Amino acid sequence: MRNFWTIYKREIKYYATSPVAYVVFIIYLFLVGMIFARAFMQFSDLSAQIQHPMFRQYYGQQNLNITEGVIQAFFGVAGFFLIFVLPLLTMRLLAEEKRMGTSELLFSYPVRDSQVLLGKYFASLTMVFILFLLTSVCPAMVAAWGRPEPGVILAGYLGLFLLSAGFLAFGLFVSACTENQVIASVVPFGVMFLLWLLGNYLLQDMPQNIRMFLYEFSATEHYRPFVEGSIGLKDVAYNLMFAFISLYLALQVMGSRKWRGQQ
C-alpha cells in the first residue's frame, strides 16, 4: 500500500506542476461553460417569452422544464468533451516512462506492476474528479435561478465519473503499449469517438438485430440514462467492465518482457 501511495503522490505532483493539466482544464471548462451559458440564456429568453400576455393569448399556458432544457444539455456536452481531454491526461502516464528509460529504474525498486498501474490510474481519476468539482458551478447557477431535479444532477455526475473511469483505463492501456505520446493520445481519442458515435449516429441504416447488438457497446447509449436521471445496473456494469478489462490488459503489457526491457 505504501508503494501505491508513493506512485499516486508522484503523479499528482506531476499534474500539479505540469502545464498540460492546466491547459486541459482550461479548454474543457471553457467549452463546457460556453455551451452551458448559451443553453442557459436561451432557456431564460424562452421563459420570458412564454410569460408575455401576447404569447399566452395565441399559444396558451406552457411550462418549461429547466432540468431538461439546461441540466441535461450541460451533462450531454460535458460527457462529449471528455473524449478530447482524457487522452491528454493519460498519454504520458506509461509512454513517457518507456521513452525516457525510467521504467527500468522504476521497476528496480520493490514495487509491483499493479501498484504502479493503480497509482497512476487513481491519480488521473483524482484530477478528473477535481475537474468535475469545478464544473459544479454550472448546476449551482441553475439551482440558484430555478428548481432543477437534484436526482438528475447526481445521476449525471455519476455517469460522468463512470464514463471517465472507463476511458482513462483504456487510455492507460494504450499508453502502456507505446512510447510515442502522440499515438498514446490519438488512438484512445479515435476509439472513444467511435464508441460515442456508435449510437444513433452510425447505426441508423443497419438491420435492427445488428443495431440492437452494437448498441450494447455504445458509450452514448450507456451514458444517456444517467443524463436523464436514471441509474441502471447494466449501464454501471458497462463502464466498470470497460475499466476493468482495460486495466487488466495494461497490467499484462506492463508485465511483459518487452516492458521490462528484458531480452
Image (cartoon, rainbow, N blue to C red):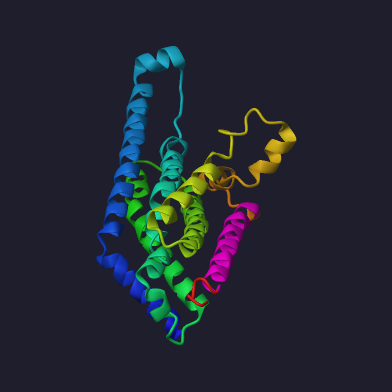
Q: Is residue 53 visible?
A: yes
| 233 horizontally vs 52: left or right | right
Above or below 85: residue 38:
above
Magenta span includes 245? yes
Q: Residue at x 34, y 29 (%)?
A: 42
Q: Left of 39 or right of it: where is 190? A: right
Q: What segment carries the magenta color?
A: 234-256
Is 253 in front, or is 219?
253
Please identify the residue farthest to the bottom as the structure is shown.
Answer: 110
Q: Position of residue 132 (x, y in %)?
A: 38, 55
Residue at left offset 48%, top offset 46%? 190
Res 214 → quadrant: top right
Q: Position of residue 66 (x, y in %)?
A: 42, 37
**Image location (x, y in percent) of residue 17:** 25, 66
Q: Residue at x 25, y 59 (%)?
A: 19
Q: Position of residue 62 (x, y in %)?
A: 46, 24
Question: Residue placed farthest to the top in the image?
Answer: 58
Task: Determine which quarter of the picture holds residue 70.
Answer: top left
Q: Could you tell me which residue is drawn at 47 percent across and 54 percent down?
A: 154
* Residue 128 visible in the current orientation: no
Q: In the rendered view, would you say 254 is above or below 127? A: below
**The quarter of the displayed image where residue 102 is located:** bottom left
Outermost right residue: 209
Q: Is residue 217 magenta?
A: no
Using the image as rendered, state which of residue 25 and residue 261 is in the foreground: 261
Side of 174 where 143 appears, left or right: left
Badge count: 0
Q: Nearer the viewer, residue 156 or 147?
A: 156
> What secondary structure do most residues of the magenta stretch adopt?
helix
Considering only vertical position in the picture, is 80 above or below 106? above
